[in-house]
Amino acid sequence: MIFWAKPIYTIFWMLLILSVLMVIAIFQGPSSITLDNALTILSNTWGWSNTLEGVRPWMQNVLIDVRMPRVLVGALAGACLAISGAVMQGMFRNPLASPSVLGVSSGASLGAVLALYLGLAAVSVWALPLFAFIGAGLTLFLVYRIASQRGQTATGTLLLSGVAIGALTTALSSLILALSLNNWEVGRMIIYWTMGGLDGRTWDHVWLLLPFASLGIGMLLFFSRSLDALLLGEVHAASIGVDVLNTRRWLLVITAFMVGATVSVCGSIGFIGLVVPHILRLIMGPHHRYLLPASAIGGAITLVGADLLLRTFTPEKAIPLGVATATLGAPFFLFLLIKKRWSIQI
């Protein structure tokens, strides 16, 4: 293994790339803000100075209230999706497992759509994440129960049940959308959520997603050794003292929380949890103590970078972020599916 590809160095370089990318994403936009003005705004915001000399009022609003929360939400959402995908791939020992492939994202989206249709999202800020979590949790539980028998999980059945349940929840979301077309405002909000994106994200969205992301990532890192044991099989994991059933339950609950919170804030953004962990596993190896933090950082890089590219090269097209990730991720999924077609036992 070459020097830079050692896991700890890879994580260091990824953190450096993420930091640089987030700074570029904050500065990039249709309204030009110079470095001097940006540093003045940040110094004033953080209490290091009391002057805003040379800064126009709109500059502070754009930098602090528009670009920074958008970039932070993108980083948190990408981290949640990618580390959830890494956990699912390790838990089910299949590189095709991810929140989108197993229908978890579409289940969370159905919950969010239902909250919007019933008007509950306007009553409480917690209604949307609560319904998204319930949708993600029920979907993941149903897929897992269908694929599991006598403590064993058949990977082929797992993927097929995930695709089937995902198609069902997507169809139900479309049905709710059709029923809501008489109310244009509700219909517009539902369409917006189903396509996914970071437009209009504020600090409220950051504070909503931050506890789920920080606590979720911390708890998933705690299970890294158990995930390493599960890679060798459920019988082997049980023989070295891993409580397989409870470990899986905890992992399912945590990932459902994280995916549900992400969908409630950003809408449905697919394939981040499939592509990022798979690529990083090829670079860093299967050990989850390195793979999980690297996946979180890699997911943040991917989503912040994708949003930056869309804002830079297609500023007038307004292409939804979820559509862009699905367009790039679906061919990658097909590539993996074709590559593994002889190894999947149905």
Image (spheres, grey):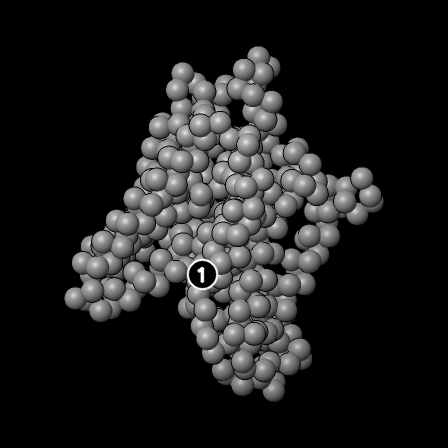
Q: Residue at x 58, y 82 (%)?
A: 32
Residue 198 position, x and y percent, is 45, 64
- Which residue is depicted at the point 66% across and 59% down? 19
Above or below, 16 relative to 245 = below
Residue drawn where x is 60% and y is 56% of the image:
301
Asked if one can make out residue 218 in the rendered structure from this viewpoint, the answer is no
Q: Residue furthest right?
A: 3
Q: Quadrant of residue 287?
A: top right
What's the amino acid at mark 1?
A: Val
Query: In the picture provided, is 248 more to the left or to the right than 296?
Result: left
Pick the residue in front: 214 or 158.
158
Circle 1 residue: 323
Q: Is residue 162 above or below residue 181?
A: above
x and y percentages locating residue 321 in the rendered image:
47, 62
What SS does tag 1 mark? helix
Vertical relation: 57 (above or below) 279: below
The residue at 45%/31% (across/down) is: 156
Residue 278: percent from the left, percent from the top? 60, 43
Using the image as rendered, state which of residue 170 and residue 336 is in the foreground.
336
